[in-house]
Image: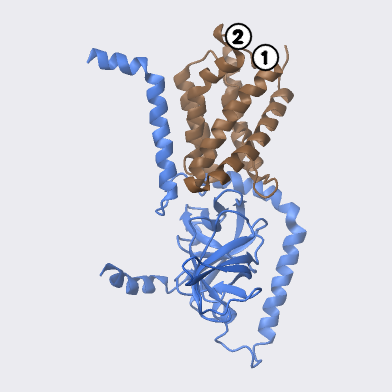
Chain colours: A brown, B blue
Amino acid sequence: MNNSLTINSILRFIVLILAQALVFNNINFIGSVNPYPYILFILLFPVNNNRTLFIFLSFMLGLFVDIFSDSGGVNAAACVTIAFIRPAVLKFAFGMIYEHQIIKFNNTEFGNRVIYFSILTFIHHLIVFTMEVFNISSIILILQKTLFSGIFTILLCVLISILFSNKD
Amino acid sequence: MQQIINFVIRNKTTLLFLLLFVIAFGLTIQSHSYHRSKFINSANFLTGGIYESANNIMAYFGLREQNNILVEENRQLRALVYNRGDSTITSTTSTDSIFSNGRYRMRSAKVINNNYSATKNYLTINRGEKHGVKEDFGVMTSKGIVGIIDNTSNGYARILSILNTKSRINAQLKTSNHIGSLEWNGESSEIVQLSDISKFAPVKQGDTIVTGGQSSIFPKGIPIGSIEDFTLDVGGDTYTVNVRLFNDMTNLSHVYIIENLDAEEIKLLENPIDEQ
């Protein structure tokens, strides 16, 4: 059980990075809107697991995406942040189930899952675009990009998580 | 001592988070400052290899279009060759100095990764140090300029695109010698801004903007774009001109790398002046 979970995570890590670099970075919907569904790795990481390892893996995930998209360290910074605040968001979105540490993302309610995805996605995107533009006077541009990319990412994340959920 | 260790163990998640966040922030700052980030870039062996194999497949989808571009360029070059004896084209015209005069060496390359949606865009090409490509070489297509090489590895190089808010390229009007600096405000991938054009310059809508030849990177007279509109600055001394690019930056495949063989000599000559 534990072993298959590890292999599953490693596979997800590699596939999501490649998909982000080769497909999702090149969508450029209406000129410049790109989704970042690679954060699914962080969103769907098993809950009752080593937090230190989780934060470190999130950092590596972001760093690889940064190397592929030449963005310095913006994705790495955003990824460690959402990995760090994930427990709080989980508690907010799922309430009791999280308290008992028996959370399985496939079995959670759809509404709760969308709320959980949305909060983390918007925080991630806000950090990414703030650090990428790095100019507080273009705050409108930052918010605009966050909103458009965020909606796109949430849609894709929900779709992918439904498509690949193995109901047992 | 015991207490410090206890503190570290108790807060190890928070401390790790802070440490990694600071590292990531440092990398971001480093990539924003002009001095190039050495190892977080797409021109390394791993990412370059992956991009190249993906490009080997994707390249087939644009073959027809690329053929048309090449035929069009051949037509231009042939027209140039057969019209050489013509009195209208003398050796001082811009295009001649690129191709026939021995100051510039041209190399061809293929774009294997192209970004244009962020505010700081880079391209990756499949030529690197082993092909003799170095930093600060210019890159152009048959239609206009693309950017400047800012990072190289053994087999790949990264281009700082003109669609990057860090990019500054010397440019001028084709009709007169008023120079300005070509920048990008991060908004549209078709329009770049030419600032610091003197108010005495004859700026007209539709006029051509070419490279200025004041830097040692690009030869003078490579086309960039045409004037879309222009506004007088608040100070009233200079124009800021919106330039519509000739190049479609969203669809690049074959590019040329320009090496200025005199660049070293020019740099040597100019450096002592800078230091004073």
The verdict on a common chain for dots 2 and 1 is yes
Q: Return the residue found at the far bottom.
A: B87
The quarter of the picture where the C terminus of chain B appears is bottom left
Of the numbered discs 2 and 1, the one sitting upstream in the chain is 2
From this viewpoint, which residue is outermost toward the left?
Answer: B1
| B217 sits to left or right of A94 | left
Q: Circle 2 — which element?
A: helix
Tell me if mark 1 has few (under 14), some (14-19) or many (20+) residues whose alpha carbon lies within 10 angstroms of its own: few
Question: Which residue is at a point 57% across and 13% down the rendered structure image?
Answer: A2
> Is B56 displayed left or right of B20 in the figure?
right
**Pointer 2 and pointer 1: residues touching (CB < 8 Å)?**
yes
Residue A35 visible in the picture: no
Residue A108 numbered mark, or none: 1
Q: Is residue A165 above or below residue B267?
A: above
User: Residue at (48%, 52%) from the top-left corner?
Assistant: B154
The location of residue B115, given as percent across then percent down, is 60, 50
Whole-Å distance between the Cαs marked 2 and 1? 9 Å
Badge 2 crowding class, 10 Å Cα cut-off, few under 14, some 14 to 19, many 20 or more, is some
Who is closer to the viewer here, A25 or B209? B209
Determine the secondary structure under disc 1.
Answer: loop
Q: Is residue B5 above or below residue A20?
A: above
Q: Is residue A160 visible?
A: yes
Q: How far from the left and from the top, in percent, is residue A116? A: 61, 22
Label total for image: 2
Question: Is residue B186 placed above or below A47 in the rendered structure?
Answer: below
Using the image, tell me which numbered label, if any, was put on residue A97. 2
> Which residue does the image show at 44% across and 43% down from the upper left?
B28
Residue B49 numbered mark, or none: none
Outermost residue, top side: A100
- The amino acid type, in three-letter code, at marker 2 is Ile
